[in-house]
Amino acid sequence: LTPAVNGRVLAVTAGLSWLTGILFGLAPALHATRGNLVPGLKEPRIGRTSRSAGVSRALMAGQFALGLIILVAAGLFLQTLARLESIPLGFNPENVLTFRLDASQAGHPAPDVAGFYNRLRAGLSGIPGVRGASLSELAPLGGRMATGVRTATKSQASLILRVGANFHSTMGVPILSGREIGDRDMTGAPRAAVVNQAFVQTFFNGGNPLGQQVTLKNDCGCTLEIVGVSADMLMGNNVRTRRGPELFYPFQGAGTIEGMSFELRTDGDPLAYASAVRELVREADPHLPISELRTERALVDGTLNREMVFARLCTAFAVLALLIACVGLYGTMSYHVARRTSEIGVRMTLGAPRRAVLWMVLRQVIAIAAGGLLIGIPAALLSSTLIASFLYGVEPRDPATLWLAAMSLLTAAALAGFLPARQASRIDPVIALRHE
């Protein structure tokens, strides 16, 4: 979908903003028109505080509480994103170009599809700057397939993937023992297989599987000989996928072959080779379309898209909420300092030091922020449990995140209230006594 401004959403947002401004703007005016002016005229000016001061402080505390909730959520999502990005993939996604072809849709008969793909892979590997080329039924992190696997001693499900020659070296997956699937395995028998460490642990209790045979229960129904053991790599469409037994075997035309994903490891930016790839595919078959052309890094980042969006949105909203709360606190305290100018002048004339005046104003700021914390901490602990399913590697009630959010809130409040407090401490007593 192409992002665009939605007229209805914009109209509703504008209407709500206008209504909120009118309601909160009229509230002080209506309060003033209903007041009794006679007691107000008789009331001393010094030390007088507005009856609405409590309401304004409560609203400010509510703003800070809301800011704390969003700060905690932003911290949790940022930690989730950092932990997901640090998960070892088992392969190197840098400088890898992937795309998908489906020769059967272009009219290639089923018996010729495997040969066509192998010839195309050989042509792609000859492009200058291409260090390796292979193909697989699904791109890494592009999906997962499973079937039952039977050995001499055990029968259990495993993730499987049909691949082309040099798949592991192209994707940067280490071969720990034995060898990877090569050109000699693409035709003839016996058919070879490469398994990962989790497969060895599950089916062979950590023993040596090289030379052992396994039987697949899918449409292939074939028996494979294990020729290599690779490191564990992520298969599936999410980096949260739990590692499990994995088996890789060459496609040879047996079974159904539909679309295949090609992987090219390149020197430099993979997208710079896109035009050469398109030209080579066009020469092989001008009626064969290329789909899902992208880098492997983009594919990996795509699996983290939801976490990235949540982290960025919550961070932006947290900063905005904190900024609005600080601006409101600055305005409120400046207003109260202006109203208490005469009182401050009397205090300083009677010998009150400037630091006492500074603390008098900052004390109110801290009280407002503390009230926001008293409301916000329980609310943040409650709301964080609602997003537990979106988190990874971090507890919803993480004390470090809560502490950091609370300290950020108190620091922002102190900075916002310092300027009005500093202004109050610098009032000239003589000018203050003439005020009003």
Image: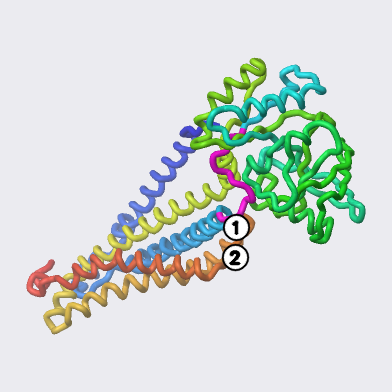
Task: Tell me if residue 142 comes above or below residue 317 in the rendering.
Answer: above
Q: Is residue 137 visible?
A: no
Front residue of this view, candidates 251 and 305: 251
Q: State the image coordinates of residue 247 (x, y, percent, origin top left).
A: 78, 46
For this view, does 111 lie left or right of residue 394?
right
Q: Quadrant of residue 372?
A: bottom left
Q: State the image coordinates of residue 388 (x, y, percent, origin top left).
A: 62, 59
Q: State the image coordinates of residue 352 (x, y, percent, origin top left).
A: 17, 82
Q: Point out the stretch of residues depicted in magenta.
A: 86-98
Q: Is residue 296 visible?
A: yes
| Dot 1 crowding, Cα within 10 Å, few <14, some 14–19, many 20+ | many
Farthest right residue in view: 152
Q: State the image coordinates of residue 358 (x, y, percent, origin top left).
A: 23, 75
Residue at numbered disc 2: 395
- At a point 72% along the width and 43% down the height, the residue shown is 180
For this view, does 110 lie left or right of residue 20?
right
